[in-house]
Amino acid sequence: MSKRILIVDDEDDIREVARIALEETEGWTIGEASSGAEGISIAQAERPDAILLDLMMPDLDGTAVLEKLKADRGTAAIPVVLLTAKVKAARELSGTGAAGVIVKPFDPQRLGSEIAEILGWPARL
């Protein structure tokens, strides 16, 4: 069965590249949110298999979104992979409840396999 991934990023281009890459390389079903608040709402309603979450967003940043997701009984078990251009910030995020971190710029051809590896999902044949 296809995995359902929610991409939460305020940059349209990043969401589009990630969506196309994950649909084409992994065959996953992709949902998109352009803000942290929208991401939380969609996660609560749709319960995706995983969330790819940008750290740097206006209003509600990725750290705040992660805290809200982990505090909600309905979304606490959804694994979250953080997406960031800040390598130093990525190192400081261990222990936040995130399953892992992918650093921007990411390789679209490897994005799906990186997410699968972080989450312990079987590789696509």
Image: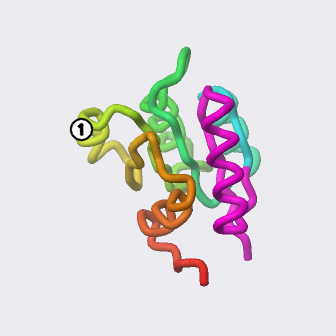
User: Residue 26: horizontal and vertical position, in percent?
Assistant: 65, 68
- Front residue of 13/59: it is 13
User: At x 50% / y 61%, what residue is drawn?
Assistant: 110
Residue farthest to the top, as pictured: 59
Q: Which quadrant of the structure image shows residue 85?
A: top left
User: Residue 82: horizontal and vertical position, in percent?
Assistant: 45, 44
Compared across the picture, whether 29 is left or right of 99 comes to: right
Q: Is residue 9 magenta?
A: yes
User: At x 45% / y 32%, what residue is drawn?
Assistant: 55
- Front residue of 73/122: it is 122
The relative height of residue 108 versus residue 33 in the rendered view (above or below) is: below
Quarter of the image where the N terminus is located:
bottom right
User: At x 56% / y 60%, what residue is drawn?
Assistant: 109
Q: Which span is picked out in magenta? A: 1-30
Q: Is residue 60 magenta?
A: no
- Front residue of 68/121: it is 121
User: At x 55% / y 42%, what residue is drawn?
Assistant: 72
Query: Mark 1 Cα within 10 Å, few/some/many (few <14, many 20+)?
Result: few
